[in-house]
């Protein structure tokens, strides 16, 4: 061993490095801290899962129901020309919102070229999320307190439209614009 050359020193150094790496891989606990050895996974031991309680869904409060006031609904019928210009032509007050027409509502209206605007006041009894339902057929937009809150897609056929909005107890103004697009027309308060 007296006359070791550079080649032998490199070989012995590589062997020493290989032994160090080999020891790390052979003894897996050498890289873990002392606290990890008590709670970690160990080779050769079965893994026992820790039971956890399933997540409980957060209950969503049911929306409050609004009621119609005794004032009824103010209705305005509007005739439309081919360019979409509006010509108000008739109106009145209805106690309940229950409109259904197989064609145009009046003989001088052209079918599928008219709309009706309904305005009413609703009574809110509890604060928070409110809801009422409309049975609709046509292009229907609902505004509550000046803000659009629901829209029924035209051409989808008869559908039940859920109108939801936030409001404090009291009264609130509701405006509904229902446009006859094709086929029969329906706008009905469903509660």
Image (tube, rainbow, N blue to C red):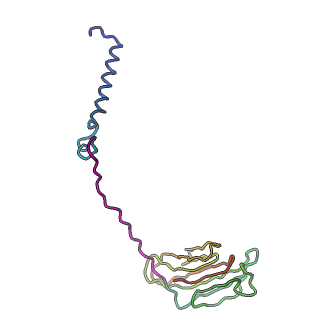
Task: Residue 79 in the image: state x and y as whole percent.
Answer: 72, 82
The reply to whether the magenta stretch includes residue 168 is: no
Residue found 60% across the figure and 76% down from its top = 141
In this rendering, would 37 be left or right of 77?
left
**Residue 20 locus on image (x, y percent):** 29, 27
Give the residue displayed 34% in from the left and 62% down from the top: 54
Report the label total: 0
Q: Nearer the viewer, residue 184 or 173?
A: 184
Q: Is residue 124 left or right of residue 138?
A: left
Front-most of 96 and 121? 96
Magenta-span inclusion, residue 61: yes
Q: Position of residue 142 (x, y in %)?
A: 58, 77
| Quarter of the figure with residue 99 | bottom right
Q: Main secondary structure of the magenta part?
A: loop
At x 70%, y 80%, the residue is: 114
Please state if 78 lies on the left or on the right of 98 as rendered: right
Q: Is residue 92 above or below residue 117?
A: below
Q: Quadrant of residue 83?
A: bottom right
Q: Quadrant of the N terminus?
A: top left
Determine the residue positioned at 50% across, 84% down. Answer: 171
- In the image shown, does 3 or 173 lie closer to the viewer? 3
- Residue 63 is drawn in which quadrant? bottom left
Please provide the residue range marked out in magenta.
44-66
Q: Position of residue 179 (x, y in %)?
A: 66, 78
């Amino acid at each position: 061993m007296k006359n070791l050359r550079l080649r032998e020193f490199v070989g012995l150094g590589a062997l020493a490095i290989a032994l160090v790496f080999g020891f790390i891989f052979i003894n897996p606990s050498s890289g873990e801290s002392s606290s990890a050895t008590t709670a970690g996974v160990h080779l050769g031991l079965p893994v026992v899962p820790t039971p956890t309680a399933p997540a409980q869904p957060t209950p969503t409060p049911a929306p409050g129901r609004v009621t119609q006031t005794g004032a009824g609904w103010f209705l305005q019928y509007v005739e439309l020309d081919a360019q979409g210009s509006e010509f108000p032509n008739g109106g009145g007050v209805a106690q309940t919102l229950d409109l259904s027409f197989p064609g145009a509502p009046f003989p001088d209206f052209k079918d599928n070229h008219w709309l009706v605007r309904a305005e009413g006041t609703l009574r809110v009894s509890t604060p928070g999320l409110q809801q009422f339902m409309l049975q609709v057929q046509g292009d229907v937009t609902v505004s509550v307190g000046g803000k659009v809150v629901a829209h029924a897609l035209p051409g989808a056929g008869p559908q039940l439209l859920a109108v939801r909005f936030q409001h404090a107890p009291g009264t609130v103004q509701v405006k509904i614009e229902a446009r006859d697009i094709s086929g029969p027309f329906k706008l009905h308060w469903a509660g």
